[in-house]
Image (cartoon, helix red, strand yellow):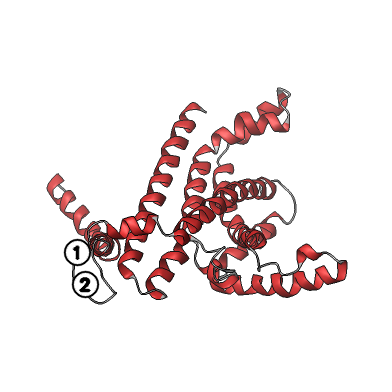
């Protein structure tokens, strides 16, 4: 097969993917960008308003509060997910009876849908925690989802419980590629467990850390299902995250153009943060 035929075959195989990507990503983004400069009501628009929607969103206290709430949530969950995910991966890659069973147990929460998971944990927080608080006379266990602080930690607990097993699987894949000869040689040389981890294991799984950072960052910003089913943004929108604020702006307030502007800013923020962390971690990989 000559180069021309190879090139033709390549584009023939790639075309369906490119068409699907254009239909579900590129075209909707461009349409959303256009509508964000209009007074679109979800059906029609009568005029182009320029940057008015973008000026309005930066004056919207609900959007600003949702942004900072989401940023705090992302910081906490990224740290906890990577620490717990890596810890679980180190645990189940040890040679002991039942490690494969534990892998399954830790991964299973990731198979439960976000809404169902949220409603399960809502029952635990509202009924289970309250009953436990009454029995132990601990007021902090009661009314768990009725204020911003405990609502925040409720969202964190559910997200970490659900995704830790998924992050664990990624770290396991990289841990199993570390040659045993290197670890054994380090043991013979007298390296402690901590030294083996910091000098050998972690540098060799640095690409996994980059992947997991990207996944946990992007997922943290995009969470909607758990937010809806656990707190529904309450009380008084104090636990409303960015995705929920955008949806509510469109469907509760009927301001679809402003919602599109928020979605565009949201897209830019998530893309910029994700790309910056990938670039930074790639550089760190080279240094390690």
Left or right side of 151 for 140: right
State the image coordinates of residue 29 (x, y, percent, origin top left).
28, 60
For residue 23, which numbered disc appears in the image? Answer: none
- To which quarter of the image does residue 160 belong? bottom right
Picture residue at 29% right of the left edge, 74% below the top: 42
Left or right side of 67 for 181: right
Front residue of 37 and 135? 37
CA neighbours of label 1 inside 10 A, class few (<14), some (14 to 19), many (20+): some
- To which quarter of the image does residue 202 belong? top right
Picture residue at 51% right of the left edge, 51% below the top: 71
Q: Which residue is mark 1?
A: 48
State the image coordinates of residue 233 (x, y, percent, origin top left).
54, 68
CA neighbours of label 2 inside 10 A, class few (<14), some (14 to 19), many (20+): few
Q: Are marks 1 and 2 in contact (CB under 8 Å)?
A: yes
Secondary structure of the residue carrying tag 1 is: loop
Relative to 151, is 191 above or below? above
Q: Is residue 219 in view?
A: no
Front residue of 156 and 195? 156
Left or right side of 143 for 270: left
- To which quarter of the image does residue 248 belong? bottom left
State the image coordinates of residue 78 (x, y, percent, origin top left).
56, 49
Relative to 17, is 117 above or below? below
Relative to 101, is 215 above or below? above
Secondary structure of the residue carrying tag 2 is: loop
Q: Is residue 170 in view?
A: yes
Picture residue at 71% right of the left edge, 26% below the top: 191
Left or right side of 254 for 88: right
State the image coordinates of residue 201 (x, y, percent, origin top left).
61, 35
Picture residue at 70% right of the left edge, 22% below the top: 189
Please identify the residue farthest to the top as the structure is shown: 189
Report the Cα–Cα distance between label 1 and label 2.
8 Å
For residue 45, which numbered disc appears in the image? Answer: 2
């Amino acid at each position: 097969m000559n180069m021309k035929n190879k090139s033709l075959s390549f584009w023939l195989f790639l075309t369906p993917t490119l068409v699907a990507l254009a239909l579900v990503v590129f075209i909707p983004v461009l349409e959303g960008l256009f509508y964000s400069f209009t007074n679109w009501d979800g059906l029609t628009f009568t005029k182009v308003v320029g940057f008015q929607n973008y000026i309005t969103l930066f004056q919207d206290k609900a959007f600003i509060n949702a942004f900072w709430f989401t940023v705090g949530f992302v910081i906490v969950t990224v740290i906890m997910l990577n620490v717990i995910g890596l810890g679980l991966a180190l645990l189940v890659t040890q040679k002991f009876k039942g490690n494969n069973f534990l892998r399954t147990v830790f991964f299973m929460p990731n198979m439960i849908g976000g809404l169902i998971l949220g409603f399960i944990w809502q029952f635990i927080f509202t009924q289970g925690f309250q009953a436990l608080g009454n029995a132990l006379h601990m007021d902090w266990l009661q009314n768990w989802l009725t204020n911003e602080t405990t609502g925040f930690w409720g969202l964190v607990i559910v997200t970490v419980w659900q995704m830790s097993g998924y992050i664990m699987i990624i770290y396991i894949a990289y841990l199993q590629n570390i040659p045993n000869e290197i670890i054994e040689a380090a043991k013979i040389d007298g390296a402690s467990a901590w030294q083996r981890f910091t000098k050998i294991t972690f540098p060799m799984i640095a690409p996994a850390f980059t992947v997991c950072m990207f996944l946990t960052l992007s997922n943290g910003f995009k969470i909607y299902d758990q937010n809806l089913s656990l707190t529904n943004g309450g009380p008084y929108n104090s636990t409303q995250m960015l995705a929920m604020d955008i949806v509510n702006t469109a469907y509760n307030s009927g301001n679809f153009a402003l919602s599109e502007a928020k979605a565009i800013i949201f897209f830019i923020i998530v893309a910029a943060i994700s790309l910056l962390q990938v670039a930074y971690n790639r550089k760190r990989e080279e240094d390690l």
